[in-house]
Image (cartoon, rainbow, N blue to C red):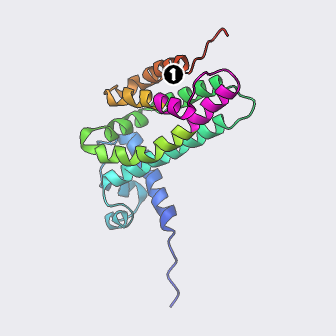
């Protein structure tokens, strides 16, 4: 009897997440059922539950994939040498604003931000925020070293900047209005950092 082929559970889980992302884009998160996902993936319903406990868990997995792609973009932009800190902060603004560029991203964000999905939102942000904090702090440190920013504590400044962005979200700003809110928060952050455009 031939041995059964081994299944790479991590790869299979990621593959189901990719299928779910496509279905969410086509049908919307709220209108997608587990049955829709398994049909698109060509698997049995029971197989789905070997990898995910619920629809909410696969929504979180899709959101985590989006966050990883987002952080890869941010880290690539921020780690470039020869780019001034203001340009990096503005690039960060543009990348964060781009989260909501696609309707499927808007729907996913709105789904995760529903009051009944607070746990999903918390699980997603508990890994994202420390990474963003480190990124923003590195931009502020560079700005202080180059004399572009004037703050005594770069880490506290990074907390302040991220707090402003988070406040826009906590205030219930609709996902479609978040790019404008992020832009306004970034302008305020530059003032707090002591940046003078015509210096």
Whether residue 51 sits left or right of residue 114 in the image: it is right
Residue farthest to the bottom?
Answer: 1
Residue pictured at 48% horizontal, 67% vertical: 9
What residue is rendered at 41% in x and 37% in y?
104
Quarter of the image that includes the C terminus: top right
Q: Is label 1 in a helix, a strand or a loop?
A: helix
- Is 64 left, or right, of 87 in this rendering? left
- Looking at the picture, how far across and down is residue 114, in whole percent? 28, 38
Vertical arrangement, residue 71 with respect to residue 41, above or below: above
Q: Badge 1 local density, few (<14 within 10 Å), some, or many (20+)?
A: many
Q: Quadrant of residue 198?
A: top right
- The answer to whether residue 101 is seen in the rendering is no
Q: Residue at point 58% right, 37% down?
A: 135
**Left or right placement of residue 139 versus residue 159 in this view:** right
Q: Which residue bears the numbered disc 1?
A: 189
Residue 32 position (above or below residue 162): below
Where residue 95 appears, as percent x and y from the top left, is: 55, 31
Give the percent coordinates (x, y) of residue 175.
38, 29
- The foreground one among 20 and 156 is 156
Quadrant of residue 166 within the rendered picture: top left
Left or right of residue 141: residue 64 = left
Asked if the stretch drawn in magenta spans residue 122, the answer is no
Extent of the magenta region: 135-161
Q: Give the number of callouts.
A: 1
Relative to 10, residue 132 above or below: above
């Amino acid at each position: 009897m031939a041995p059964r082929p081994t299944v790479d559970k991590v790869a299979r889980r990621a593959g189901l997440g990719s299928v779910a992302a496509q279905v969410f884009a086509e049908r919307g998160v709220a209108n997608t059922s587990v049955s829709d996902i398994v049909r698109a993936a060509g698997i049995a319903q029971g197989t789905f539950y070997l990898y995910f406990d619920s629809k909410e868990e696969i929504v979180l997995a899709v959101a985590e994939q989006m966050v990883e792609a987002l952080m890869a973009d941010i880290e690539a932009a921020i780690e470039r040498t020869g780019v001034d800190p203001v340009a990096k902060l503005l690039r960060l603004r543009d990348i964060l604003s781009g989260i909501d560029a696609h309707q499927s991203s808007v729907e996913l964000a709105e789904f995760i931000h529903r009051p009944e999905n607070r746990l999903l939102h918390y699980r997603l942000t508990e890994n994202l925020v420390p990474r963003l904090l480190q990124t923003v702090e590195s931009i502020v440190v560079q700005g202080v070293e180059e004399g572009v920013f004037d703050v005594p504590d770069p880490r506290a400044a990074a907390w302040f900047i991220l707090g402003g962005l988070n406040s826009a979200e906590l205030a219930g700003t609709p996902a479609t209005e978040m790019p404008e809110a992020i832009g306004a928060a970034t302008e305020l952050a530059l003032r707090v950092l002591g940046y003078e455009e015509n210096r």
